[in-house]
């Protein structure tokens, strides 16, 4: 009985299971009948029972008197008897395992540096959803950030400035959401790849109060002071030259798309960029192809220049 009480108090003091914070650690419990299993221990009543959640997600309450020993399991599968760990050791282990669990959610990627070297690892990314479907974003300030947090094998984090990066490639994303270029220390997602590229970036911010042109039929739409906005910009990147082709903005207060698409300006830019393919230009001039057809235009142009 004395051993059970001491063991219980030691377990409480080391694990902190009476706190409101969830315990990130995995445990290995050995019972006095020699039954043993890996589990999580989300809750306990001191000196009475512990609640365990096994790998198959089954739950069980076990009385303390049936427990022989409890081990902590690290992410490498190593087991350490809880009685031989100091509180500082367990705190450090908990921090390490929490970090590893967070890193496991990061996306596999590789970065091509401006030096030509390629590094493989992970980057923190998440998928967001809008009314138009799923798209990849990294954080609210991703597009305006001057650096990217990168995870090397071995759990080592490194902050890369955009000036160091030539390309970023996310492995587990759909085409059009995988490849990113750093151009003049800004990040652009490659929508259509090839000798000529259609690329995209965006700016998020808070309006100081402005009137913006409404593409839905003329006039202006007010973006009130303090309203969040998202400016989405599409560019052609060809022969190391970046040309803005289309800009759309959505204000969170009205969700009305505001598109700046001057037909004459768009055609003028196309004449300069796509001059090598007269047949393609003719379809742009007669408005068979418009700014909403940028993907098709870039695909057609890449095919055209490859055939020359």
Image: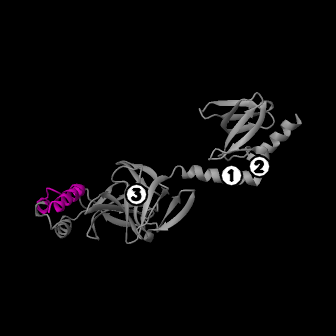
Tell me the element at label 3: strand
At 62% from the left edge and 47% from the top edge, which residue is drawn? 76
State the image quarter where residue 53 is shown.
top right
Residue closest to the eye, 63 or 306: 306
Tell me the element at label 1: helix
Q: Earlier in the sequence, mark 1 or mark 2?
A: 2
Q: Is residue 57 left or right of residue 160?
A: right
State the image quarter where residue 115 is shown.
bottom left
Residue closest to the eye, 272 or 33: 33
Separation of disc 1 and disc 2 at Cα? 10 Å
Reading the image, the residue beneath label 3 is 169
Q: Is residue 307 magenta?
A: yes
Separation of disc 3 and disc 2 at Cα? 42 Å
Q: Which of marks 3 and 1 is nearer the N terminus?
A: 1
Q: In this view, does 83 lie to the left or right of 159?
A: right
Q: Main secondary structure of the magenta part?
A: helix
Number of marks in picture: 3
Q: Is residue 279 left or right of residue 155?
A: left
Q: Marks 1 and 3: in contact by CB < 8 Å? A: no
At 67% from the left edge and 45% from the top edge, which residue is drawn? 78
User: Which span of residues is magenta-colored?
Assistant: 280-308
Dot 1: within a 10 Å radius of its alpha carbon, few (fewer than 14), some, or many (20 or more) residues? some
Reading the image, the residue beneath label 1 is 93
Q: Position of residue 275 (x, y in %)?
A: 15, 68
Reading the image, the residue beneath label 2 is 85
Q: Where is residue 200 in the image (x, y as percent from the top left)?
A: 33, 61
Q: Which of marks 3 and 2 is nearer the N terminus?
A: 2
Q: Marks 2 and 1: in contact by CB < 8 Å? A: yes
Separation of disc 3 and disc 1 at Cα? 32 Å
């Amino acid at each position: 009985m004395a051993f059970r009480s001491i063991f219980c108090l030691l377990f409480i003091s080391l694990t902190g299971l009476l706190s409101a914070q969830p315990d990130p650690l995995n445990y290995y419990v050995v019972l006095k009948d020699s039954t043993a299993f890996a589990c999580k221990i989300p809750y306990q009543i001191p000196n009475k029972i512990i609640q365990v959640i096994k790998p198959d997600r089954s739950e069980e309450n076990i009385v303390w008197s049936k427990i022989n020993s409890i081990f902590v399991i690290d992410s490498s599968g190593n087991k350490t008897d809880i009685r031989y760990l100091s509180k500082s050791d367990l705190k450090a282990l908990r921090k390490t395992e929490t970090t590893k669990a967070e890193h496991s959610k990061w996306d596999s990627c590789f970065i091509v540096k401006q030096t030509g070297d390629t590094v493989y690892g992970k980057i923190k990314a998440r998928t967001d959803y809008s009314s138009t479907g799923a798209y990849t974003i990294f954080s609210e300030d991703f597009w305006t950030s001057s650096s990217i947090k990168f995870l090397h094998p071995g759990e080592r984090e490194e902050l890369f400035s955009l000036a160091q990066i030539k390309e970023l490639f996310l492995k587990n994303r759909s085409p059009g959401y995988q490849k990113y270029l750093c151009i003049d220390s800004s990040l652009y997602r490659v929508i259509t790849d090839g000798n000529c590229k259609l690329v995209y970036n965006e700016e998020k911010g808070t309006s100081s109060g402005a009137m913006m042109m409404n593409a839905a039929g003329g006039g202006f739409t007010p973006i009130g002071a303090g309203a969040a906005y998202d400016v989405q910009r599409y560019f052609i990147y060809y022969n190391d030259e970046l040309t803005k082709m289309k800009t759309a903005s959505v204000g969170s207060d009205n969700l009305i798309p505001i598109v700046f698409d001057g037909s004459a300006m768009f055609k003028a830019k196309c004449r300069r960029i796509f001059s090598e393919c007269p047949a393609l230009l003719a379809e742009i001039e007669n408005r068979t192809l418009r700014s909403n057809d940028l993907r098709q235009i870039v695909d057609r142009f890449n095919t055209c220049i490859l055939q020359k």
